[in-house]
Image (tube, grey):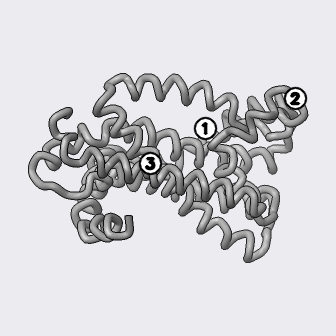
Amino acid sequence: MYAYISSIWSYRYFWFSLVQNDLRQRYRGSVLGMGWSLLHPIAMTVILCVVFGSIFQQDYRFFGPFLLAGMAVWNFLTQSIIVGCNSFFMAEAYIRQQPIPMAIYPLRTVLGLGFHFLIGMGLVVALSLWFVGWPGIVPILSIIPSMLLVFLFSWSLSCIFGLATVYFRDTRHLSEVGLQILFYLTPVMYPPSVLEGRRLGILLKFNPISPFLELIRDPLIYQKLPSIETFGVAFALTLIAMVVAYSALKASEKRIIFHL
């Protein structure tokens, strides 16, 4: 796997130019340009905070950063899956021209989405420091490896679902439906305490998204280091996803062209 990652790095100028071009195309002719990446999460957070903050009787100074952190992680993970489903079809011309590591094409997708994720996380940190306070240097620094795990997990899922779509074209549609269901079973818009102690509370333990939400929320919202268990579960999920993605890519790299 190390040699494979090194090979991907050797093509860094290629995939970096792809990401740059995607961002230019997305905001070409837009008045606000990349400002939409900041305005959109703010608008969504304000609306959801007003609606669900009153439902769950939450203080907006806590619920605002809590909600924005959850939406930032959720949107990045799920968009990596949904948009990643088409990553190989979008790169069909490149795949036919040159045999380069296939993981580059989902990486292109995830890096583009990661740009907006970084902007969202910057806003989360700013709001958390303003409303919740300074958690300490160690909890703040823990966000760096946490975001790296979120990125690697998202990249791996993008590879897996992208390959699945090549062989089964309905994967994206099924993913969208499945993620809609998962959204309401994941503590994105509501505190985990809403489910704890109830029959649905067991879903928190087996929800693959929950550990990644905790990694970001614990230091910023609850002002504490994420537990070793949370880090361990997130790391294990990321490692499993990476191994599955790598194995699937290596098995498909010579015959994927015949299915595009």
**Front disc: 2 or 1:** 2
* Kind of residue at disc 3: Val
Task: Identify the image quadrant of residue 53.
Answer: top right
> What secondary structure is found at the residue carrying circle 2?
loop
Task: Tell me how far mark 1 sits from mark 3, CA to CA.
Answer: 34 Å
> What secondary structure is found at the residue carrying circle 1?
helix
Q: Is residue 81 visible?
A: yes
* Kind of residue at disc 2: Arg
* Kind of residue at disc 1: Met
* Residue linked to disc 1: 44
Point 73% across, 59% down: residue: 128
* Residue linked to disc 3: 244
Q: Residues within 10 Å of mark 3 (few under 14, many from 20)?
A: some
Decide which of tag 2 and tag 3 comes sooner along the chain: 2
* 42 versus 234 height, above or below: above
Decide which of tag 2 and tag 1 comes sooner along the chain: 1
Question: Where is the N terminus found, in terms of image quarters?
Answer: bottom left
- Which disc is residue 198 wearing? 2
Task: Identify the image quadrant of residue 15.
Answer: bottom left
Task: Residue 254 in the image: state x and y as whole percent.
Answer: 19, 47
Point 58% across, 42% down: residue: 74
Give the camera-side residue of 184 and 59.
184
